[in-house]
Amino acid sequence: LNTSTTMKSFLLLALASSAAAFAPSQTKVSSTALAADLTSMPGCTAPVGPFDPMNLAESGSDETLAWFRAAELQQSRIAMVATTGYIVQGSGIHFPGMLSSDVSFESLSSMSPLEAWGAVPDAGKAQILATIFIAEVITESKPVHYTKGGPLPTMVFPAIDFSGVDEATLKRKQ
């Protein structure tokens, strides 16, 4: 197998292992207060109000909105980590030692971030995809799914404890 075929296979496996494959089967749910009150949800800022330019909150049930919110939270966290990694690698900072038997971390620091990704062995890319797959399976296999009122996934990024902040301050900052 050539590299292109291998990468396409890994990409196909990653797509096939999406979180939707592990979500509980959907049942018809009627909701009297569709998508709750957006202005009372965390993340709604005072001067702007709810930001929903595509009206996604109205496109389905409360479960759909919970799924959208969890996906937004997860993807934003991944984007922050990826951006940090891109900046750190682009700054020439690297781990000591070897990435594989023939690639050192130091040799990657002389490349652009995209060139460095291309130099990562396919086995390393497979490990990354396997880790993502396992994290998705674990976070989507909770006894009470977040679309059914359970907590949002926090496996990789634990929730921040705001218990020491008074309710009025939290409400004002939301």
Image: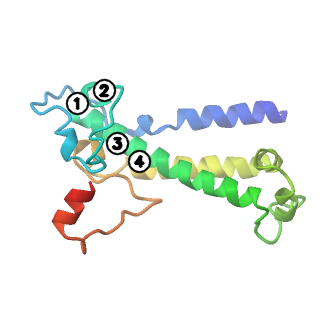
Q: Answer few, some or many: residues within 10 Å of disc 2's Cα (few below 14, many 20 plus, some between 14 and 19).
A: few
Q: Are the residues tagged 4 and 2 within 8 Å (C-beta)?
A: no
Q: Is residue 18 above or below residue 129?
A: above
Sequence-first disc among 3 and 1:
1
Q: Is residue 53 above or below residue 104?
A: above
Q: Residue at x 73, y 52 (%)?
A: 124
Which mark is on residue 61?
Answer: 1
Task: Give the spatial CA distance, label 4 vs label 3.
Answer: 6 Å
Task: Give the spatial CA distance, label 3 vs label 1.
Answer: 13 Å
Task: Give the spatial CA distance, label 1 vs label 4.
Answer: 19 Å
Q: Residue at x 61, y 51 (%)?
A: 82
Q: Answer few, some or many: residues within 10 Å of disc 3's Cα (few below 14, many 20 plus, some between 14 and 19).
A: some
Quadrant housing the C terminus? bottom left
Q: Answer few, some or many: residues within 10 Å of disc 4's Cα (few below 14, many 20 plus, some between 14 and 19).
A: some
| Closer to viewer: mark 2 or mark 1 | 2
State the residue in front, 153 or 68: 68
At label 4, the amino acid type is Leu
Q: Position of residue 59 (x, y in %)?
A: 28, 24
Which mark is on residue 69?
Answer: 3
State the residue in front, 89 or 142: 89
- Provide the secondary structure element on which disc 1 rests: loop
Q: Position of residue 34 (x, y in %)?
A: 17, 31
At label 3, the amino acid type is Arg
Q: Position of residue 66 (x, y in %)?
A: 29, 41
Q: Are the residues tagged 4 and 3 within 8 Å (C-beta)?
A: yes
Sequence-first disc among 1 and 4:
1
What residue is shown with label 4?
73
